[in-house]
Image (cartoon, grey):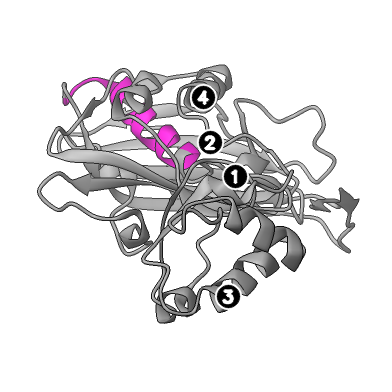
């Protein structure tokens, strides 16, 4: 990890929504949010960080096509095998079994079709997940049974990222069809009780944690934020304007707001306020805002 020091530090005016409503407020602690993070990571783990290269038999390529040796060169390059070793392994396997990579469109042009990987090494592959496990991390929400939960993960030399997808049961997709054009996972969540503040807290926090599913090293984003309920003792920047740092849920007649603060040292030290707004009775986010409250003199990149 490399430390980078910026040239200035500053404090900004807090947004108006950091002032709590006079009524309808439920307060939480930073520990409640950290527990939601830990529960998500325990119940919905991504692939392990296994950096050893996979054996060529751990992914299936169907319809190998008329030019198998050109395909073999592509596989050899991606897996880091010598050509002799790639030929030896291929000779010992059925022609339908050859590697552990989604090796892009040039394989399709060779008549090859790469399907789901079985879970280790480099490349992009589908990873098994269950909606029931995700809901264990958010017990005050419910899963919409019209959807399946699917996941894709990516690994490369210690880096990693992934994404969870709610896929309509009536719309079966291959894993190659799981792209960023699909809805985020919170679109499949239901609120059992419109007046339960904890449901909206879980929707706001677990949705953010889900953006770091399967994240490693450079793939980590939200994981650099740490939930706070007071000015951190480690803060070395200018003191921001006095605020109540505690997480809270504000219940209005038609909308619900989840407000909380985080500290991050990624790239630059920051204290950040976040507000998510939901239509009452819905776990699907309608608006999300964040505001940097103060910037410190240090930071890191990784």
Which residue has dot 4 on it? 33
Which residue has dot 3 on it? 69
Whether label 2 touches label 1, CB < 8 Å: yes
Main secondary structure found in the magenta portion: helix
Observer able to see residue 76: yes
Query: From the viewer's perspective, is 2 left or right of 70?
Result: right
Q: In this view of the protein, which residue sits in the foreground, 179 or 40?
A: 179
Residue at left offset 80%, top offset 50%: 296
Q: For mark 2, does the 10 Å Cα neighbourhood hold few (<14), some (14 to 19), or many (20 or more) residues?
A: many
Magenta region? 194-209
Residue at left offset 44%, top offset 52%: 289
Residue at left offset 68%, top offset 57%: 88
Q: Nearer the viewer, mark 2 or mark 3?
A: 3
Q: Nearer the viewer, mark 4 or mark 2?
A: 2
Which residue has dot 2 on it? 46
Q: Nearer the viewer, mark 4 or mark 3?
A: 3
Specify which label sits upstream in the sequence, 4 or 2: 4
On the image, the x and y values in percent for residue 209 come to 49, 37
Which residue has dot 1 on it? 215
* Mark 2 → mark 1, Cα distance in angstroms: 8 Å
Specify which label sits upstream in the sequence, 1 or 3: 3
């Amino acid at each position: 990890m490399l430390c980078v020091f910026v040239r200035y530090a500053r404090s900004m005016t807090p947004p108006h929504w950091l002032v709590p409503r006079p009524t309808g407020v439920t307060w939480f602690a930073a520990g409640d949010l950290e527990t939601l993070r830990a529960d998500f990571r325990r119940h919905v783990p991504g692939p392990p960080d296994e950096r050893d290269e996979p054996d060529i038999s751990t992914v299936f390529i169907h319809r190998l096509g008329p030019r198998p040796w050109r395909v073999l060169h592509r596989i050899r390059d991606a897996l880091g095998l010598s050509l002799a070793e790639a030929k030896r392994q291929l000779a010992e396997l059925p022609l339908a079994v050859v590697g552990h990579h989604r090796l892009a469109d040039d394989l399709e042009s060779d008549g090859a079709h790469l399907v789901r990987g079985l879970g280790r090494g480099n490349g992009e592959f589908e990873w098994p997940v269950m909606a029931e496990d995700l809901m264990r991390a958010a017990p005050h929400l419910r899963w919409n049974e019209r959807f399946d939960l699917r996941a894709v993960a990516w690994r490369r030399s210690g880096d990693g990222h992934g994404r969870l997808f709610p896929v309509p049961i009536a719309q079966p997709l291959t894993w190659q069809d799981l792209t960023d054009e699909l809805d985020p996972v919170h679109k499949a969540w239901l609120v059992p009780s419109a007046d339960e503040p904890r449901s909206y807290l879980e929707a706001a926090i677990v949705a953010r944690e889900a953006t770091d599913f399967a994240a490693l090293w450079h793939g980590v984003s939200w994981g650099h934020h740490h939930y706070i309920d007071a000015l951190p003792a480690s803060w070395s920047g200018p003191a921001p304007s006095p605020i109540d740092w505690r997480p809270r849920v504000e219940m209005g007649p038609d909308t619900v707001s989840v407000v909380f603060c985080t500290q991050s040292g990624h790239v630059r030290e920051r204290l950040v306020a976040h507000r998510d707004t939901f239509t009452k009775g819905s776990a699907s986010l309608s608006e999300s805002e964040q505001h940097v409250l103060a910037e410190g003199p240090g930071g890191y990149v990784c």
